[in-house]
Amino acid sequence: MRFPLLLLACLPLLGQTTRDTRIAQAVKALHPKLVECRRDFHMHPELSNREARTGREIAARLRALKLDEVRYPVALNGVVAILKGKKPGPVVAWRADIDALPINEILDVPYKSKNAGVKHACGHDAHITVGLGIAETLAGMREEIAGTIVFLFQPAEEGPPGDEAGGALLMLKEGAFSNPKPQAIYAFHVSGDFEAGTIAYAAGPFLASADTFSVTFKGKKAHGSTPQLGNDAVVTAAQCIMALQTIHSRRIDTSQPTVLSIGTINGGDRHNIIADTVKVTGTIRTYNEAVRESIRTMMRQTLTGCTSAFGSDFELGWSTNTYPPTINDAKSVAFAVPVLKRVIGQANVLEAKPVMGAEDFSYFLRQAPGAMFWLGVRNEKKGFGAGIHTAEFDIDEDALDIGVRTGSALLLEALETKR
Ligand SMILES: [Zn+2]
Ligand SMILES: [Zn+2]
């Protein structure tokens, strides 16, 4: 009697293994198409909010898959696609971002960028491909989908130009999370830090918030030989920049990682004129919303005190293009990790430390619990060793299969798992 009981207990697991095997076989057959797809988007990269061809092509490829609904355009060049399973169940979303970066392609590869000065250097070409690959794989498995899958192909993740609206916020504003409303959301981001064949996770903080600021220091011009007749914006800026660094080192809880970086400084007219204006720009990063708010307050306090010591004035401005911290839902990660381990093997699923980069996927995570994972694309033996946002960045395309296999399994099981 023991044997049949054991067999019964193993049945769900056997079922999953069979499904994993079927998915793996389907993805193996899909591999040439995944490579063709990734290379097509890699050759035609487009900047944030300018992804006209990209969005059109994604919509066309999704329509060819005969999904239940393909909404295009959403948020200028984005696409929302809906796949309904034959079984009842909840709604889970998958997100892929689609824009490229103003970086010149220097690699001499057959799929080199055809748009001068623009390159898919953040791997969003791979994100599009994995998203389309999952849609194609699951479109062939409707019978066993217990609910609805919403695919979000989102433009302008790298930030819309100037003060244009765009990205995840505009997708949400234009109804990405309505009819139907997802109860969970998942995404991958490629990573040059992890080997192709691996996936890395972090529960809780995954990526930081990003806020861009500018400070204009206002003084008074005078001849360089008579500083007492002016008000030197260069000296004020120098002192205030140093004072701003004490926010992190002296005032914020030392257990809270934060960054306050000044990236540019410009001012003055000539070597022998006291400058009346100096403008600096910078970024603040943190994993904690309360800390983020504190830093903003402390910056104003510091600048008020510091400039008043010099009898001068300042203006502090914030970009409207800001990203909250990307905080992965711990329960969603706890659910996903065993699935990932089962599909690609225990040793290939790694724990990652949070990093200070930022993602507007964070806006989706404010609407529904979920998680983003790193999809490893590094393979030095094949010459893929560069990090994202570099001119040398490229990926091991075998990672596309890993993304589609794990993403498909994750979505199917997210629909079947009671939360
Ligand atoms: Zn990026
Ligand atoms: Zn990116």
Image (cartoon, grey):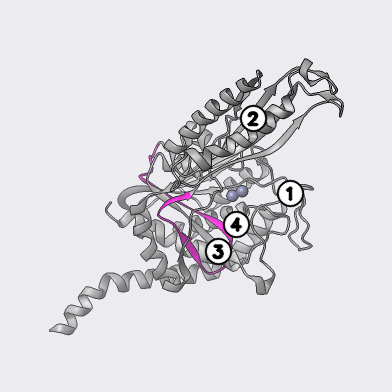
Residue in front for this viewpoint, 101 or 354: 354
Question: Of marks 4 and 3, which one's residue comes earlier in the chain?
Answer: 4
Q: Which residues are magenta?
A: 179-206
Q: Nearer the viewer, residue 417 or 89?
A: 417
Q: Which residue is disc 2 drawn over?
A: 214
The residues tagged by marks 3 and 1 sit, at their Cα atoms, a distance apart of: 22 Å
Contact between labelled residues 3 and 2, with CB atoms less than 8 Å apart: no
> Which circle, 1 or 4, is nearer the viewer?
1
| Of callouts 2 and 4, the N-terminal one | 4
Label placed on residue 103: 1
Q: Are marks 4 and 3 in contact (CB under 8 Å)?
A: no
Q: Amino acid at mark 1?
A: Ile
Looking at the rendered structure, the secondary structure element under dot 4 is helix
Determine whether the residue tagged by mark 1 lies in a helix, strand or loop. Answer: loop
Residue corresponding to mark 4: 126
Q: Are marks 1 and 4 in contact (CB under 8 Å)?
A: no
Q: Earlier in the sequence, mark 2 or mark 3?
A: 2
Q: Locate residue 25 relative to residue 332 in the image: left or right.
A: right
Amino acid at dot 3: Gly
